[in-house]
Amino acid sequence: MNMTRIVVGVDGSEPSMAAARWAAGEAQQTGATVDLVHAFDWDYYGGRFDGGNILREWAEDKASTTLADAAAAVAAVAPGVTVSHEPVLGSAVPVLLEAAADASMIVVGNRGRGGFGSLLLGSVGQRLATHAPVPVVVVRGRPDIGAGAVVVGVDGSPAALDALAAAFRMAASRSARLIAVRAYVPPTPPWGVNVEPVVYDVAERDAELHAELDEQLAPWREKFPDVATETLVAHGSPAGVLVGLSHTARLVVVGTRGHGSVAGALTGSVGLQLVHHADCPVLIVR
């Protein structure tokens, strides 16, 4: 993996331009380069039959214009960042997966133009978030994320601990506060006759989870002493809690999967809910 190369999927839509601008800022902070990738296919409505050459030339010209516009967006944010770009014939998902094989991350917008050259979340974006071999950032939500915190979902699973490590690095590079969140749904009292009540001290469980969070954060607090941290134990579904926090966050970080719904974990489905509903960029770590 090349830890200094960020791959950005662009298709000319405003969400993909937002992804290019976010990647530019990340590259400026980390010393990375930006590789803009636009996948196109000129086989459109039977274009490989009569008149196919004309359509292919049009598609290539459009791809070059799209990439030039994205490169200009990167330069406007981070003039000193090295940018490479090349149109690639093929479908978006396999092209981006191949391009990112030795990259540090893939960055895409939350949706694209749909159909031709699409990066529509729910198709390309969702498949990347699920199958990419490297971390994926889906840039979405409000246009100005300001100086909010980096929020990370933690449940003790290996994937969540990887997310915690990435969140500390992100917070450190941005001089941002970090909020580590453990969300769970307390059991509800049983209904019906002859049913034993649930013996469950919620306050005691909250204290245990706070202690677990402090233990999990301890080595990272030592490694990144300048990062201000906060732990939060919240009642509710992990996705709902993290979406709520995204309204004031600059970035939400999660692992690909956690311990499962019984443990109130951050599963792959939670990550996918975030990339559909969060109000700020989402980093899915793998």
Image (cartoon, rainbow, N blue to C red):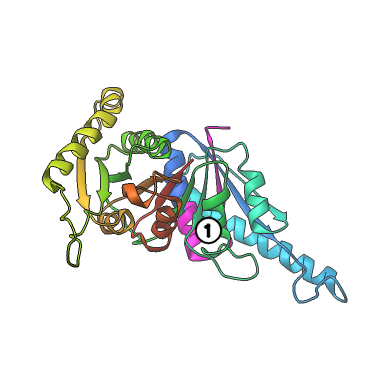
Q: Amino acid at mark 1?
A: Gln
* Residue bounds of the magenta highlight: 1-20
Name the residue at 33% across, 60% down. 279
The residue positioned farthest toward the right in the image shown: 50
Regarding mark 1 in the picture, which secondary structure is present there?
helix
- Percent position of residue 158, x then y: 42, 35
In the displayed structure image, the side of residue 132 where residue 137 appears, left or right: left
Res 159 seen here? yes
Would you place residue 50 above or below residue 259 in this image?
below
- Percent position of residue 77, x then y: 43, 49
Query: Which residue is at the front of the view, 149 or 164?
Result: 164
- Percent position of residue 75, x then y: 49, 48
Query: Which residue is at the front of the view, 227 or 32?
Result: 227
Name the residue at 26% across, 45% down. 181
Please give the residue where the numbered disc 1 appears in the rendered image: 126
Res 147 seen here? no
In the displayed structure image, the side of residue 174 where residue 229 appears, left or right: left
